Image (spheres, helix red, strand yellow):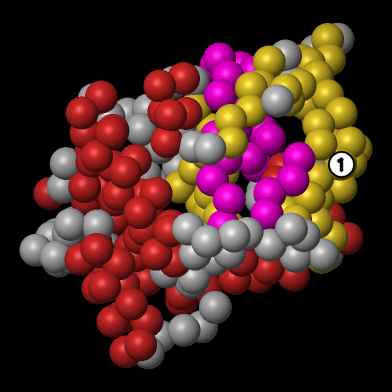
Amino acid sequence: MGSVDPHPLLRATGLHKVYSMGSRELHVLVDVGFEVCAGQKVAVVGASGSGKSTLLNCLAGLDTPNAGEVWLNGTSLYKQTRSARARLRAKEIGFIFQSYQLIPELDALENVLLPARILRRYGEAERNRGRALLESLGLKDRMRHRPHELSGGEQQRVATARALINTPALLFADEPTGNLDSTTGERVLEAMIEACALAQAAIVLVTHDEGISKHFPRVLTMADGRLFS
């Protein structure tokens, strides 16, 4: 991809997240700073429990940090109302979950179109974009299949198309190959990165698998709630 914008698309400063476990406090994020520019590919690698998923949730506005701030395109996420933050997230952010999170009663195309419906976009243009995304991910003949009729790799590709339907500037992926065998995971990851490149979306992926980082020019390490270059 071409040169990226030198101004950060996403910027986080001083993120701190604490969970109370009885009389004990668990510091999951400790003074985390983070920046992503438009079009960048970033991998965050760390062991289970290191704080990776919590970091993504705070960066996406899904979870509220105890301290710190996150800006998306210059807009402070946590100074928005909950509904305004949800709308901003729907417009600017796509999210891929490890467990796919597809609705079993809906077929692949209907699942892909759900984020568009959140923004009250119901037209043929959205349906055409959903079809094009699924086709680009190798699912041209699987659009009318429901999740139980799809393999794990196919379900994750549907989830990728769903995350990209609103043309987000930024895509978060939380252990997206964690439930897949190594060969399928590699294929899904390559398709995901290619789809993000075509959509000119930045991607931030968290994983415990250090082998995945070979696909990413920028790799950070997470340990004990702290982020390291």
Residue 28 visible at all = no
Residue 140 visible at all = yes
- Residue drawn at point x = 46 percent, y = 84 percent: 121
Name the quadrant of the C terminus: top right
Q: Magenta stretch containing residue 151, yes or no?
A: no
The residue lying toward the viewer, choosing from 107 and 175, is: 175
Q: What is the span of residues highlighted in magenta in the rendered image?
A: 34-57
Residue 220 horizontal side relative to residue 131, left or right = right
| Snapshot quadrant of residue 49 | top right
Q: Magenta stretch containing residue 36, yes or no?
A: yes
| Relative vertical location of residue 117 with respect to residue 229 in this rendering, above or below | below
Q: Callout 1: few (<14), some (14-19), or many (20+) C-alpha neighbours within 10 Å?
A: some
Residue found farthest to the front: 3
Residue found farthest to the top: 23
Amino acid type of disc 1? Thr
> Could you say where residue 104 lies in the image, as x and y percent from the top left?
27, 53
- Residue drawn at point x = 68 percent, y = 62 percent: 5
* Residue linked to disc 1: 13
Number of numbered discs present? Answer: 1
Query: Which element is circle 1 on?
Result: strand
> Could you say where residue 170 lies in the image, as x and y percent from the top left?
58, 57
- Residue drawn at point x = 28 percent, y = 33 percent: 185
Residue 174 horizontal side relative to residue 13, left or right = left
Residue 107 horizontal side relative to residue 195, left or right = left
Residue 149 horizontal side relative to residue 181, left or right = left
> Could you say where residue 10 lies in the image, as x and y percent from the top left?
73, 54
| Relative vertical location of residue 119 with respect to residue 41 in this rendering, above or below | below
Residue found farthest to the left: 141
- Residue drawn at point x = 43 percent, y = 29 percent: 214
| Relative vertical location of residue 184 with respect to residue 83 in this rendering, above or below | above
